[in-house]
Image (spheres, rainbow, N blue to C red):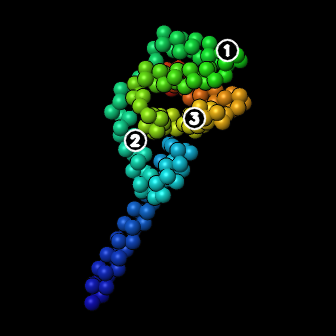
Amino acid sequence: MNTLILIGVLIIGIVVVGIAALIVLKKCRTEGWRARYGPEYARTLQESGDQGLAEASLEERQKRVERFHIRPLGPSDRFRFAQSWSRLQARFVDDPTGAVTKVDQLVGDVMSRRGYPVSDFEARSADISVDHPLVLENYRAAHEITLRHAEGQASTEDLRQAMIHYRALFEELIDELEMAGAEAAS
């Protein structure tokens, strides 16, 4: 009888430890997703309304982007894109509308050259979120201003903010070669 009680207690203990381990692993996994995706994790969670669905969505994004051939820009491409950015930034003074429209296209060109598929905005932003989650909010904000402007609902100050938002993503996209070199050196 004592042996059966002992076996029962051991089984219950093993089950409790197993459940606790699963809870801890799930919490660690969630914290990993939050740390990697930052605000994009919260946005995805809010959209899906379910933690499991949100994390599955982020995991699917990650797997999809792993199939792409994302590459850093070569020095000549980086120089060419940086020159284009400088010209568009200077153009903003005389033609804010045209400059923002062209900057949106330039960012798309950089993404394409890097190996990201350039389809609709939501797919593009989901893809960018995998490698550049911290600047994704800037991209979303710039895109939203661009859409409002197309409807005649954005001021010149809004367009200036769009340029600032686009610049955050643009700089990260073209400077990745330098960052990779710095990481390799350390």
Q: Nearer the viewer, residue 62 or 178?
A: 62
Q: Which numbered dot is residue 15? A: none
First of labels 2, 1 by sequence position = 2
- Viewer-proximal residue, 27 or 142? 142
Q: Which mark is residue 61?
A: 2
Secondary structure at numbered mark 3: helix
Question: Which residue is painted at 36% across and 34% down in the image?
Answer: 66
The three-letter code of the residue at mark 3 reads Leu
Disc 2 + disc 1, Cβ < 8 Å: no
Give how far across and how far down residue 50 sits, in percent.
Answer: 46, 58
Q: Alpha-carbon distance for marks 1 and 3? A: 22 Å
Question: Residue 149: image x %, image y %?
Answer: 62, 32
Q: Residue at x 57, y 34 (%)?
A: 147
Disc 2/disc 1 C-alpha distance (Å):
36 Å
Kindly report which numbered mark, 2 or 1, lies closer to the viewer in this rendering: 1
Q: Which residue is mark 1?
A: 90
Of circles 1 and 3, the one toward us is 3
x and y percentages locating residue 118 in the rendered image: 42, 28
Q: For the N terminus, give its image quadrant.
A: bottom left
Judge the density around disc 1: few (<14), some (14-19), many (≥20) Cα neighbours within 10 Å. few
